[in-house]
Amino acid sequence: MNETIKTTADVRTTKKFSAVWIIPLVSLTVGIWMLYHYISSQGPEITLTVQTAEGIEAGKTEIKARSVKVGVVTSVTLSDDYNSIVLKAKIDKSAAGLLRKDSLFWVVKPRIGKEGVSGLDTLLSGSYIELRPGKAKEEQHAFAMLEVPPLAPPDAKGLRVQLTSNQAGKLSVGDPVLYEGYTVGRVEKASFDIERQKAVYQLFIFQPYDALVRTRSRFWMTSGIDLQLNAEGFNVDIGSIESLLTGGVSFSVPKGSPQGIPVTQQMSSFQLFDNMKQIREQMYENYLEFAMLFSESVRGLNPGAPVEYRGIRIGTVEKVPLHLSNRTDGFSSKRIPVLVHIEIERMFDPALSMSSSELRANFAREFKNGLRATLKTGNLLTGALYIDADFYPDEHKQDYLNQYRGYDVFPTKAGGFAQIQRQVSSILNKVNALPVESMLVSMDGTLKSTEQTLKTFNQVGKNLDKLLKQKDTQQIPGEVRESLQQIQDTLQGFSPDAQAYRDLEKALANMNDVMAELKPVLRQINEKPNALIFGDTKREDPVPAKGKN
């Protein structure tokens, strides 16, 4: 059997893809899909700035919105300038729409404040960061966290108003806003405007109480207790317990003032007053300005002091002093100008339409009839003064200035203590003018003449005694002898040994001592006439010096 042997090989084409690569390719596809799903499921990263990281831990502290977890803090680091803490946090993709320009963040932890107790649930679970969504259209990923929780959400129904004051620290965040003693809102913010140099307080008044705020409403501080002592008696008003402990702010429309219209515009501005009394003093917008020129001391007269007419307030002191003296006058003018406001609504019915010129003409007529202003003491303890206006018949013929540096002049008259001081000074001047020294010399001469006369009476008594002892005298009838005996007894009463003579001599000596003691008093009165009222200034005790050997 012969077989043919093949000398060439059979060439066959094999498959280019091996089934072995299916598993790695599937694994790679699944990995890429998982990576894409992880990346696409991740929300944005935000940056939070806070002053302290107390209770915050990276990887543990959660971010919640309405008690639902929407993110977690990933890192906690110091800022580049070391003045704050920078937090990095991841927000879930589903919550990315919550990050708006007006969104708010703050740390929820146990708090005890004026608005109550909050955050007790964090005692066991730990602190977390609360996210309050905003309503703005702009998206934002960097926020400054609040130190305290906000009192009302941005979408809360109500009215926000601003109060301005010249002093800071009067209100704190969380203080109540009261209307007739009922809490209708809270203080949201307290800041200071550097440009206007005023404290700014933001209030939130809840609905439906926001309708109580009107254009003529006035806001004032509430201390919780108000004490008044006046002619009607002793009055005590006590507010709520909260206002008594923490204070607050109240508002209403003052009685007698127009109600105005309701305020609907957010962030309307109002002035913050110290108390209701200050509001009543400044609620009169129509007034006449007068300058009062006083020739006595105005110490104790302060801006805001009342101007009264027979006990009825008609105005307010605006500026004390109005200005210092002119360059040419210096202190020679001897008058201190005071600017006052005569408030028209305190004197006349607002319904009466009287022009300013008519009112000034009325005052000019009253000035000619003797209307004058005087300074009087309003408080003996503090020395506070007020201005009292009244009619003085003796003054209607006295001349006065009509204008003073562009202001109409309200004529004045020295009154009260100044009048008493002038009268006392006049009396002391008269006493000082008395010829005291010549009177003392005359009295001394009179005393010497009286002493010589008494000596003469004593000599006459001795002579009569010798005469009565003679025999011829004893033969005089008994009646004559008795008469002579009575004369002798009388003359003996004026002898130096007699009691009457000693009493008279003692009285004259006492009078001489009194007049001697009166000399330094009269000298002091001559040097300082008002020493009887104010006393003499105390002199320092003498310091003993070492003597020379």
Image (spheres, rainbow, N blue to C red):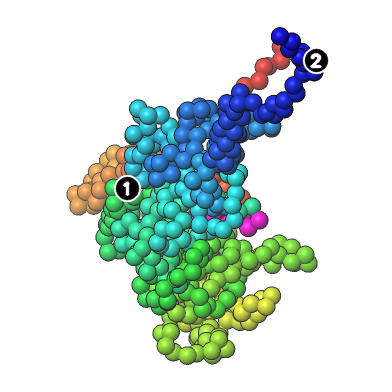
Above or below: residue 397 compared with residue 135: below
Segment tinted magenta in the rendering:
195-203
Q: Residue at x 26, y 60 (%)?
A: 233
Of the image marks 2 and 1, the number of the one nearer the N terminus: 2
In the image, which disc is placed on residue 7?
2
Q: Amino acid at mark 1?
A: Glu
Q: Rate crowding at label 2 as few (under 14), some (14 to 19) or many (20 or more) other CA atoms within 10 Å.
A: few
Q: Residue at x 34, y 34 (%)?
A: 120
The part of the image, by quadrant, that contains residue 49 is: top right
Residue situated in front as seen by the camera: 56 or 384: 56
Is disc 2 placed on a helix, strand or loop?
A: loop
Q: Amino acid at mark 2?
A: Thr
Residue at the top extreme, as displayed: 1
Is disc 1 placed on a helix, strand or loop?
A: helix
Q: Residue at x 20, y 52 (%)?
A: 479
Q: Main secondary structure of the magenta part?
A: strand
Q: Rate crowding at label 1 as few (under 14), some (14 to 19) or many (20 or more) other CA atoms within 10 Å.
A: some
Residue situated in front as seen by the camera: 406 or 295: 406
Q: Which residue is mark 1?
A: 242
Residue 433 in sight in this render: yes
CB contact under 8 Å: marks 2 and 1: no
Please state if 116 lies on the left or on the right of 431 as rendered: left
Number of numbered discs on residues: 2
Above or below: residue 523 compared with residue 111: below
How far apart are the alpha carbons under marks 2 and 1? 115 Å
Residue situated in front as seen by the camera: 520 or 506: 520
Q: Is residue 518 magenta?
A: no
